[in-house]
Amino acid sequence: QGCNSNSRGALVVLEGLDRCGKTTQSSRLVQYLEGLGHSAELWRFPDRTTSVGQMISSYLSNKSQLDDHTIHLLFSANRWEKRSSMETKLKSGTTLIVDRYSYSGVAFSSAKGLGIEWCKAPEVGLLAPDLVLYLNISPEKASERGGYGCERYEQLEFQSKVAQYYQVLHDSSWKVIDACQPMEDIEKQLQEMVLECVKKCHNGEPLSQLWL
Ligand code: 2DT
């Protein structure tokens, strides 16, 4: 357990297409870690509670229109405004389970046709996740799950492009999990991966920064 006085929490990100099960699995992971006596919190991006987050929320529900570059930078700003409290939490020993992060930022904006390097630039210097759990599902299978809602982006063709850009972003911090398995099986696999990561971070693995 986290008894080392200078041990930090882990930054764990869940990514994947809409309907892949990220949100359900994220909250289960937090419950699991808390059950083991670890300090853990569920975070999500966009964080719609801030004033930047409210602009994003209004855009996503089609209540406002914004140029693609502008909304991209707002999503990024929404992570930057949380960066220091994220670092403080991690350093105080709390593990953060984060539902979407910079990978969503780059994959969704690139899928609209913005250059991938341009999309990555404002993310440089944000905290790098210790572990990215990618819940892998085909866009077709995802669209069969309860149907998409009416938010922007919830369309098959667009989700297919997003999936392609996620592939490009895949790096050594990623673990890919088959999201079509039974929910309990996925849950077990995620628990093992997260626990190993939490231990590594408690043992002094340093925090790093994205895309430097
Ligand atoms: P939720 O349905 O998970 O709330 O996501 N998105 C998200 C981006 O385009 N850029 C980003 O940086 C992030 C974090 C993905 C809302 C939608 O916003 C997209 C789906």
Image: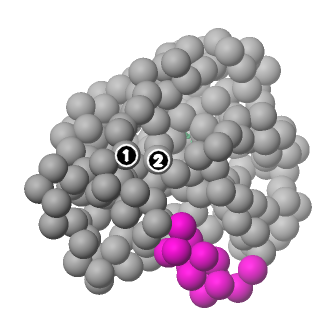
Badge 1: residue crowd in 10 Å (few <14, some 14–19, many ≥20): some
Quarter of the rendering containing residue 1 = bottom left
| Amino acid type of the residue that numbered disc 2 sits on in the rendered structure | Asp
**Residue depicted at 71% across the width and 20% down the height:** 116
Earlier sequence position, callout 1 versus callout 2: 2
Query: Which stretch did the figure color magenta?
Result: 181-193
Tell me what residue is drawn at x 59 percent, y 46 percent.
173
Q: Is residue 10 rendered to the left or right of residue 193?
A: left
- The residue lying toward the viewer, choosing from 72 and 187, is 187
* Foreground pick, 96 / 151: 96
Measured in 3D between alpha carbons, the distance from the residue under mark 1 to the one under mark 2, in whole angstroms, is 9 Å
Task: Give the residue displayed 71% in from the left and 41% down from the top.
Answer: 170
Q: Position of residue 181 (x, y in %)?
A: 75, 80
Look at 70% across and 85% down and name the residue there.
182
The reply, left or right, for residue 136 in relation to residue 120 is: right
- Residue 35 shows up from this direction: yes
Residue 85: x percent and y percent?
22, 38
**Callout 1 touching callout 2 (CB < 8 Å):** yes
In the rendered image, which residue does mark 2 sit on? 130
**Is the residue 94 above or below the residue 196 in the image?**
above
Between 66 and 129, the one nearer to me in the picture = 129
Dot 1 corresponds to which residue? 205
- Principal secondary structure, stretch drawn in magenta: helix
